[in-house]
Image: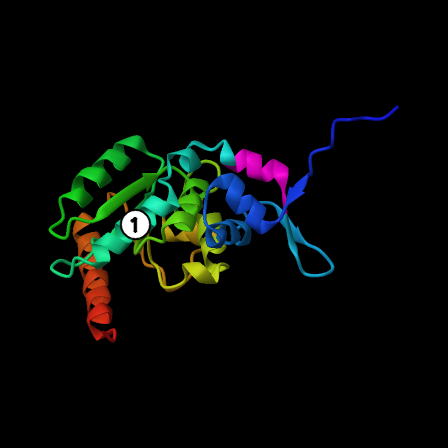
Amino acid sequence: MNNNNPTQKTFCTTRETAIILGVSLRTAQLWTESGLLEAWKTKGGHRRIARKSIELLLANPTVRELPAESNLTRRITDAGNETSAPEALNILVAEDDQTLCLLYEYKLRGWPMQPNVCIVNDGYEALIRMGHVKPDILIADLQMPGMDGFKMLNTIRSVPELSGMKIIVVSGLDPEEIASRGGVPEDIPVLSKPIPFDQLQAIAEVVAAQRQNLKTKEPT
């Protein structure tokens, strides 16, 4: 007996994945490289992405809340035409304590540089955000549900597209416990809780100055 219902493919190409998720091809590639999407390569070197992992990512509220990339690109282009003021820093905070999240948002938005602040509750959501817009600064806790800070930092270090981003760890763990759990890369500063907002602001001011210097040196 013939079956007239075609079987749905269990995998997609990277381009098909980008269309389904409503993101750019680069973002789909980044989410694949970071492990957010389950993928493998054919003998010919073509990447195939498991449809189930696409559906799981699509169901994530973080993905649904992201602005359309076409709108994002338009806002970035418009901002680039406004030469009178520098673009605001993009700061991503990964922290699961809701009280600290509110404190981060209140304090960081009050900085003189008026950064754009985005707060997520685990490493998984942080990587989703990074695939959409790479932050200038990532402030990360280490103890989080789902994907913790240790795994998130290791994943970030394996993705070339995320290099150059300033990463700061703010944790309540003592150095011995951090070391016993694998540690963090040596170039990432580890600050202790309670959150040292003065130190964070000083680092952010350096990053903002460095970015402005690079911008002024770009050929016109």
Residue 108 visible in image: yes
Q: Does residue 60 lie above or below 72 as drawn? A: above
> Helix or strand or loop: what does disc 1 sit on?
helix
Give the magenta-colored segment's residue range. 49-57
Q: Position of residue 33 (x, y in %)?
A: 54, 54
For the point 68% across and 39% down, the residue is 10
For the point 18% across and 38% down, the residue is 106
Secondary structure of the magenta portion, mostly? helix
For the point 11% across and 51% down, the residue is 112
Q: Amino acid at mark 1?
A: Arg
Quarter of the figure with residue 219: bottom left
Query: How many numbered marks, from 0 up?
Result: 1
**Quarter of the picture holding the N terminus:** top right
Q: Residue furthest top?
A: 1
**Quarter of the picture holding the C terminus:** bottom left
Q: Position of residue 39 (x, y in %)?
A: 62, 49
Q: What colouring method underlies this structural image?
A: rainbow
Q: Position of residue 111 (x, y in %)?
A: 14, 48
Q: Mark 1 packing: few (<14 Cα in 10 Å), some, or many (20+)?
A: few
Foreground pick, 184 / 43:
43
Taking the image as shown, residue 96 lies to the left or right of residue 55, namely: left
Q: Is residue 114 magenta?
A: no
Taking the image as shown, residue 208 lies to the left or right of residue 128, namely: left
Foreground pick, 54 / 209:
54
Q: Is residue 55 magenta?
A: yes
Q: Does residue 186 lie above or below 142 as drawn? A: below
Foreground pick, 102 / 22:
22
Q: Position of residue 181 (x, y in %)?
A: 48, 50
Residue 170 visible in image: no
Where does label 1 land, which residue? 74
